[in-house]
């Protein structure tokens, strides 16, 4: 179990950023067009929206690694398939919503990069905690195949 205050703060920041800047009411319809399996969406939802259930009891490190891997798949796919075409995929808006929609669309690429950077920071912090607690054993992250290539998915293709 991970109860590290830095990790909890990072997960909280990641969730808040995702809800406000990535999966907001303007961009969400376009996100749903991404070809991600239900399990990936479920892991992203648990990672970005259900912090309260972990805040007091801590995180299972293997579960957090899988959530990070799902977030990395999302980032990679969104960069490739959504960033170049987001303007045409987000429904038009009127009135004051038009300004907010245009801001959400214009800033999506940079907001996605901030999300990726936060997830990468969390991943690197977890690796350090994992190595420190391994004490002669093999760290957990080395046994999770979904983490293979995560650097390129988060940092950029």
Image (spheres, grey):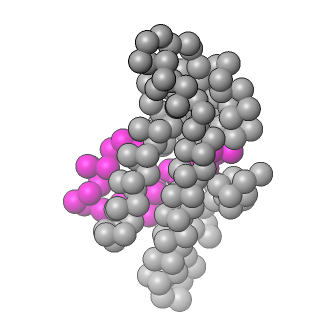
Residue 13 place in picture, x, y as percent = 39, 54
Residue 142 place in picture, x, y as percent = 62, 70
Q: Within the magenta stretch, is there residue 121?
A: no
Residue occupying the point 48% across, 69% down: 126
Q: Within the magenta stretch, is there residue 68?
A: yes
Q: Is residue 16 above or below residue 118?
A: above
Q: Residue furthest right?
A: 157
Relative to the observer, which residue lies in front, 137 or 114?
A: 114
Q: State whether residue 129 appears in this view.
A: yes
Q: Residue furthest bottom?
A: 136
Residue occupying the point 57% across, 79% down: 138
Horizontal arrangement in the rendering, residue 106 relative to residue 19 (left or right): right
Q: Residue furthest left?
A: 56
Relative to the observer, which residue lies in front, 77 or 46?
A: 77
Residue 27 place in picture, x, y as percent = 53, 27
Q: State whether residue 140 appears in this view.
A: no
The quarter of the rendered structure image containing the N terminus is: bottom left
Q: Main secondary structure of the magenta part?
A: helix
Residue 90 place in picture, x, y as percent = 59, 19
Horizontal arrangement in the rendering, residue 54 relative to residue 86 (left or right): left
Horizontal arrangement in the rendering, residue 62 relative to residue 3 (left or right): right
- Residue 146 found in image quarter: bottom right
Residue occupying the point 46% across, 77% down: 129
- Residue 91 found in image quarter: top right
Residue occupying the point 68% across, 35% down: 83
The residue range painted magenta reads 47-76
């Amino acid at each position: 179990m991970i109860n590290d205050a830095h990790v909890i703060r990072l997960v909280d920041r990641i969730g808040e950023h995702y809800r406000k800047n990535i999966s907001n009411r303007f961009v969400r319809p376009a996100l749903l067009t991404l070809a991600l399996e239900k399990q990936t969406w479920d892991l992203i939802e648990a990672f970005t929206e259900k912090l309260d259930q972990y805040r007091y009891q801590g995180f299972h490190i293997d579960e957090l690694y899988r959530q990070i891997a799902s977030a990395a798949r999302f980032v990679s796919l969104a960069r490739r398939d959504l960033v170049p075409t987001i303007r045409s995929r987000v429904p038009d808006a009127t009135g004051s919503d038009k300004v907010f929609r245009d801001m959400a669309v214009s800033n999506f690429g940079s907001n996605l990069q901030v999300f990726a950077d936060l997830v990468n920071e969390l991943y690197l912090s977890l690796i350090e905690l994992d190595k420190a607690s391994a004490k002669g054993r093999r760290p957990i992250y080395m046994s999770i195949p979904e983490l293979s290539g995560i650097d390129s998915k988060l940092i950029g293709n």
